Amino acid sequence: MSGRSQRTQNQPGQNRRGQEQQNREQQPQPKGQMLELINEMSAEVRLHRDAFTAAMPRGVSPQQIMQDAHNCLRSTKNLPLVYRPTFVAALLTCASLGLRPGVPGLGHAWILPFRNFQNNGRLEAQLIIGYKGYADLAYRHTRVVGIASNVVRSRDTFEIDLGDDKLTHKTPPFGVPRGPAIGFYAFAKVQGPYGTERILTEPMSAAEMEEHRDEHAMHKEWVNGRRVVAGVWLDHFDEMGRKTMIRLRLMKSMPVALDLATAAVVDEGVRYDLNPEADPAKVTERPSTVPPPLDPHAPVRDSVVIRTPDRQGGITPDQDRRIAQLMRQRGMSKNDALDLVEKTVGERLSARQLNEEQAGQVIDAIQAIPPDPIGGTVLTPDREENEQRIVALFDGLDTRLGADRRLRDLSTLVGRDVRTSADVNDGELGDIADVLTACKGQTAEWDAAVKAAADQRKASGI
């Protein structure tokens, strides 16, 4: 039995299983049509049971990765809407590396949705490997006996001597805040011919890590003609910094197992190949997620970073939910909301960038706008979910249909000209979603349903 198989079998214990059960119980329960999509995706995953068996370490049941897949779908927003082959392929990569995605207590890896603008903005599944996943893979080399990656904060005592491999890192007394992150470092303990030696990395300051993030973060958005960092680097800066110290600095000096080298290639990538025998490093792509600017001739300014506000003084969860609710009630688009925020607080900020005082001002400004039940389409939660579901079902057809073709087919189904989703009412959206679901990804079935609707209208003289 390989070292990877033995380690994977020996790790799970009663405490871990109890923690995973508790995590599952704490996950929010999906409702309605999203639950139906989750069940469909889970069924799709189960169809690939033999592929998972072939990819996973010997002796490990494929039921484990299939359960992890279901938990990922339930706990990650919009993941059930991704292009299905990319989700299954990401699971195959996790299976071949012996990593468990979406288990918070382990922190091995996550599968997240993102829009691939190299594929017309299609929602796809991206594999993100955590620093704990990197550490677990590092231990698979027989000479590695210890590995760690840490954050240095402003009130810590930190000294490092690279010449003598001496490291001192002390935190303040218990209860004293450590302050913001000011640097990162990593080290490994390696078994050598003369005993155990320690390999230290040259530390990176927080400013250097931010420069690395600005250059290499895949998720970026356009705001006022600037590309801004978004996604996992924005939400989990410290964790991504710790991973970078292992991936960027430590791996250059330490002995590396094959699985660890593969992880460094597939991390933050997307895979389309469903062959379990394929080398994940050779079938994984790292497409750009930077959307094209609205004005292709507009000048591109230097990259800037939108920071997540500190918890103290930041927008509260209740305020965030209230803003989203008011936007739906008034049929406001994201651009409408950004314009309103800019007019109210003097800066063009998203909701999560507001502090508590600014959020209160924005809520008052939106409430001052009377709801208009006649003009525009009110995006109720059910309608928004239906629209996302229809897009995902169209993307899941075995033959891709262009935007013009989709609108023509929708016009045939509802019996009038459809130019945007606003031209279709809530009831019709639900019916369209049901028709697409019944087609089970077969374009021929969809064509037959559209033709039947056209024939019925023709026979009725409509």
Image (spheres, rainbow, N blue to C red):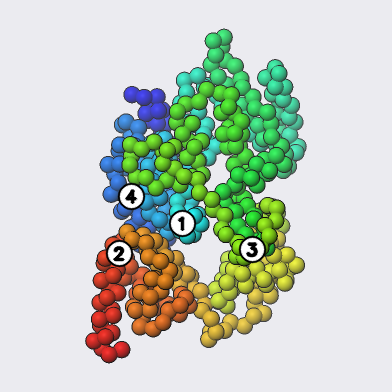
Crowding at label 2, few (<14), some or many (≥20) Cα neighbours within 10 Å?
some
What residue is rendered at 32% in x and 59% in y? 398
Mark 1 or mark 4, which has the lower sequence index? 4
Work out which residue is located at the far top of the displayed protein and give it: 194
Crowding at label 3, few (<14), some or many (≥20) Cα neighbours within 10 Å?
few
Q: Report how far apart the C-alphas of labels 4 and 3 lie in the structure.
A: 43 Å
Q: Amino acid at mark 4?
A: Val
Q: Is residue 91 left or right of residue 343?
A: left
To which residue does mark 1 refer?
Answer: 119
Is residue 204 something one can see in this rendering? yes
Residue 76: x percent and y percent?
A: 47, 54
Q: Amino acid at mark 2?
A: Thr
Crowding at label 4, few (<14), some or many (≥20) Cα neighbours within 10 Å?
many
Tell me the SS state at disc 1. helix
23 over 396 or under it: above or below: above
Q: Report how far apart the C-alphas of labels 1 and 4 lie in the structure.
A: 23 Å
To which residue does mark 3 refer?
Answer: 297
To which residue does mark 4 refer?
Answer: 45
Q: Is residue 248 left or right of residue 33?
A: right
Q: Report how far apart the C-alphas of labels 2 and 4 lie in the structure.
A: 21 Å
What residue is rendered at 27% in x and 73% in y? 449
